[in-house]
Structure formats: C-alpha cells, structure tokens
C-alpha cells in the first residue's frame, strides 16, 4: 500500500477485516517489520485518538514514531504556492516536507479543511503536496475531505457487533455549535457503501454530502423515518458541503436540537448500537442516556483506531520490504 486515503486503497474489505481481527488478537506478532523504521506523524490540528492510536500502532509494529505539532513544536508553515512570505509563516511546505521525509520511512498527516474555499479543500491541496514532495507512503490522519483510519475502525466495530449478516446502518447529521469539516461523514459513507450493509444517510436539506462519497446510499430527509429498524446509528455533525449551493460551503445551516440523538430516536431502531467518532458534544449530538447506555460503542470504536492504523502501517511496512 503506497498511500491510504480511500476505501479502494485497502483492497478487498473482507481480507482487510480478517487481517484486522488477526492484528487485534496478536498485536505484537509483526514487531520485526518496523525494526529500524520511523513514522513521522504531522499534526496541523488537535487530536487525542489519532495521535495516541497511531503512536501505539507504530510501537506495536516495532517502529519509532516521531510526532510533530506544526506551529507549536515547529515553525508555522506556509501551504500556498506562489505567495510572498511576509506574514507569520517562516517556512514553506515545499522545503519542510522533503526535510521531514528524509528523517522517516512513512508519513501520517492531519490537516483539516479550512472550510473557506471548497475547491482548495476538495483538491486535498496540503495532502497532495506531501505525496508529491515526500516520496514516502502517506496516511491521511484526517485530511480536508477524508478520515480513512476512523472509517476503517468504524467498520471493524460494526463487524464485531453486528447481529445480522447485513445490518442497517444509518448516518445521521446532528447539531453542533461550531462549523465542522465533512471528512468523517465522507469517509464513513464511502466505506459503508463498500461494505455489506444497508446504508441510509439522513440530514436536513442543504447538508447533502459530495456525490463521490454518497454513492448509491439512500438519502432520507425525515430523520425518524431513516432511523426505523436501524441496527447501528452513527451520529456526526458536519457543516454545509456546498453541493447544492457552493456559496454556503462551510456554513452552519441548522442548529435544530430536534436532530440530537436521544432515547426517542433510538426507540424506533432495532435496539441499535450508537456510534460516534469522538470527541462528542454531549446533549448536542447525543443525549447522556444514549451515549451512557450499554448499546453505546464509542469506546470500543476508539479502541479499534489502534487496529485500523496498525493494519495500514503493517501493509506499508510489508510493501517497503518488497
Ligand atoms: N476521532 C478522532 O479522530 O479523534 P481525534 O480528533 O481526537 O484524533
């Protein structure tokens, strides 16, 4: 595996899930693969799970992880090409990336969408520079449009908990006080479309996700109708993707608390499991009683972030040995 952004990068999903279960059962069985290898984990944005699970996965594989927090541990980096660098950014990505690449074998990058310029974000401008100028395998640790390590962990969690062969999975928008990127719902939709599930997306009008991620999913604007009979409810906020009106890209169009997932919402499901990628705003996205119920999977989901990251890094290390 050269890079990890999309579900297509992981190949056969059943094989990837089987490998994930093996990795989970025997996490230290491939410790030899990472001997004398280094992974650089570059964070332009905050993180708890991605930072820690990526480090843990690297350590399980015998690799040395180096974490760099851009703008805190390093110089502030300019990401735009062709600008006069007379502001507060001291170094350009054009130099910083090959320098970082010279110290490592694999690079992971977290770089959120700016939510100002749809074209810039959806071109994955920062991540593409890492691919172009590093010459190393690159993992998206949540970039402008995708969060594949999260979606893979979500799929592993669904596989572990499903009670029927083909469960109904519902992705529901929920309110949030701040404008958030679309990376998590984009990747979740992309991976669910590739998985053996019945997949439904529900959100208020104006929050339509990019068609490349929606694929063949059913889109139902009536949240309660969408949730009927669900086996898994995946809640997430996202800002306006600007699909129907590009001028609204990144805006908050609704804070309707009627979309908060509470006991009344869960009551119409098939005793569904509740999922969220975390961090979560309690009693905005989900009520206390739902997230604290035994059917909440938010902690196992986060724990599986080590497994998904480890499968991806393991495959990259195996590829480096060829
Ligand atoms: N879910 C997730 O990516 O969490 P962090 O932002 O804390 O890494």
Image: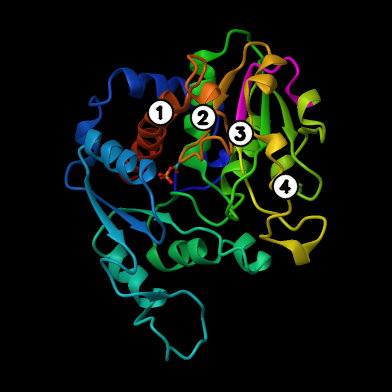
- Say what secondary structure mark 4 lies in: loop
**Dot 2 corresponds to which residue?**
154
The quadrant where residue 21 appears: top left
- Residue shown at 69%/44% (left/top)? 213
- The one of 305 and 72 positioned closer to us in this rendering: 72
Q: Are marks 3 and 2 in contact (CB under 8 Å)?
A: no
Q: Which residues are magenta?
A: 226-234
The quadrant where residue 121 appears: bottom right
**Dot 4 corresponds to which residue?**
209
Q: Are marks 1 and 2 in contact (CB under 8 Å)?
A: yes
CA gap between label 3 and label 4 equals 15 Å
CA gap between label 4 and label 2 equals 19 Å
CA gap between label 1 and label 2 equals 8 Å
Comes first in the chain, label 3 or label 4 = 4
- The one of 141 and 99 positioned closer to us in this rendering: 141
- Say what secondary structure mark 3 lies in: strand
- Residue shown at 55%/57% (left/top)? 144
Residue 29, which numbered label? none
Label 4, residues with CA under 10 Å away: few <14, some 14-19, many ≥20: many
Comes first in the chain, label 1 or label 3 = 3
- Residue shown at 18%/41% (left/top)? 35
């Amino acid at each position: 595996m050269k890079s990890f952004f999309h579900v297509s990068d992981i190949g056969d999903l059943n094989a990837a899930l089987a490998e994930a279960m093996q990795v989970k059962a025997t996490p230290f069985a491939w410790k030899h693969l990472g001997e004398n290898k280094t992974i650089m984990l570059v964070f332009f944005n905050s993180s708890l799970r991605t930072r820690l699970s990526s480090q843990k996965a690297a350590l399980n594989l015998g690799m040395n992880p180096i974490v760099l927090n851009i703008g805190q541990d390093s110089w502030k980096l300019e990401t735009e090409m062709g600008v006069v660098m007379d502001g507060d950014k001291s170094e350009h990505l054009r130099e910083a990336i090959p320098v970082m690449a010279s110290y490592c074998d694999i690079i992971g990058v977290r770089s959120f969408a700016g939510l100002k310029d749809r074209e810039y974000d959806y071109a994955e401008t920062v991540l593409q520079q890492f691919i172009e100028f590093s010459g190393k395998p690159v993992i998206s640790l949540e970039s402008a449009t995708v969060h594949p390590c999260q979606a893979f962990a979500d799929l592993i969690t669904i596989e572990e908990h499903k009670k029927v062969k083909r469960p109904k999975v519902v992705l529901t928008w929920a309110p949030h006080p701040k404008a958030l990127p679309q990376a998590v719902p984009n990747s979740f939709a992309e991976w669910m479309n590739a998985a053996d599930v019945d997949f439904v997306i529900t959100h208020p009008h104006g929050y339509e996700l990019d068609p490349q991620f929606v694929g063949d999913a059913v889109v139902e604007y009536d949240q309660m109708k969408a949730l009927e009979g669900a086996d898994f409810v995946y809640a997430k906020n996202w800002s306006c993707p600007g699909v129907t009106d590009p001028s609204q890209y990144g805006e908050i169009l609704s804070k309707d608390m009627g979309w908060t997932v509470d006991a009344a919402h869960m009551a119409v499901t098939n005793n569904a499991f509740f999922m969220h990628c975390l961090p979560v705003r309690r009693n905005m996205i989900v009520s206390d009683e739902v997230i604290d119920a035994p059917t909440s999977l938010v902690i196992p989901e986060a724990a599986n972030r080590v497994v998904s990251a480890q499968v991806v890094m393991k495959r990259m290390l195996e590829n480096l040995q060829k």
